[in-house]
Amino acid sequence: MTADAVPRIPLLGFVGYSGAGKTTLLQKVITLLTRAGVRVGLVKHAHHEFDIDYPGKDSYVLRKAGAVQVMVASAAREALITEETRQPAPDPDLFRLVQRMDTDRLDLLLVEGFKHECFDKIEVCRAANKKPFLYPEDRHIIALVTDRSLSQPPPVPVFGLDQAERIVRFIIERCGLHARTLDNATQTT
């Protein structure tokens, strides 16, 4: 990672095998962080093609006509759709994507996926997946979220899949974030 690729805000990943519960956990974590006043951005890796526009929409028609970049914008949101022209295209470069984020408007940048990249990550592992842990081989894993029983404690903090509040407290402390009182953010409604 080059110096210009390092964001000026904390970058923290959630990694694990498909079906581990990363998205479900991130939904809870982002909700709690937002309630605590933390401005959160997210980069998500997809292992397949995806569309954010669809047949019949102007952006889709113009992209299919050959535009390799389409910006769709309204007063409330904007999206840049970039068509990869190389075949076959390699996986996207996380740090190139991070550079495209407007980090001046964020306090924390979360990442779902990109488990082979070198940055701080929280591993999510579900017993039902019957997959091995990543943390023994990845020195960038700073915490483990699992429902598996552990024969010996790992060298990182361990959280249960249902402990979103504790995970958020860990993130705020670890990343040095200034959040409003987390007690208000973690109260169930």
Image: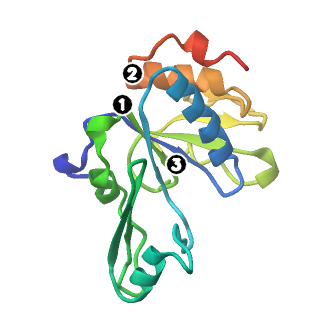
* Residue at image point 38% right, 17% down: 178
Give the secondary structure at mark 1.
loop
Give the color scheme: rainbow, by chain, secondary structure or one colour. Answer: rainbow
Q: Give the alpha-carbon distance from disc 3 to disc 1, as whole Å.
A: 29 Å
Q: Give the alpha-carbon distance from disc 2 to disc 3, as whole Å.
A: 28 Å
In this rendering, is residue 101 above or below 65? above
The percent position of residue 117, horizontal first and vertical second, equals 41, 54
Report the residue marked by disc 2.
177
Which amino acid is tagged 2?
A: Leu
Quick one: which residue is furthest to the left in this view? 4
In this rendering, is residue 28 above or below 18? above
- Disc 2 vs disc 3: Cβ atoms closer than 8 Å? no
Disc 2 or disc 3, which is closer to the eye?
A: 2
Report the residue marked by disc 3.
137
Which amino acid is tagged 3?
A: Glu
Which badge, 3 or 1, comes first in the chain's sequence?
1
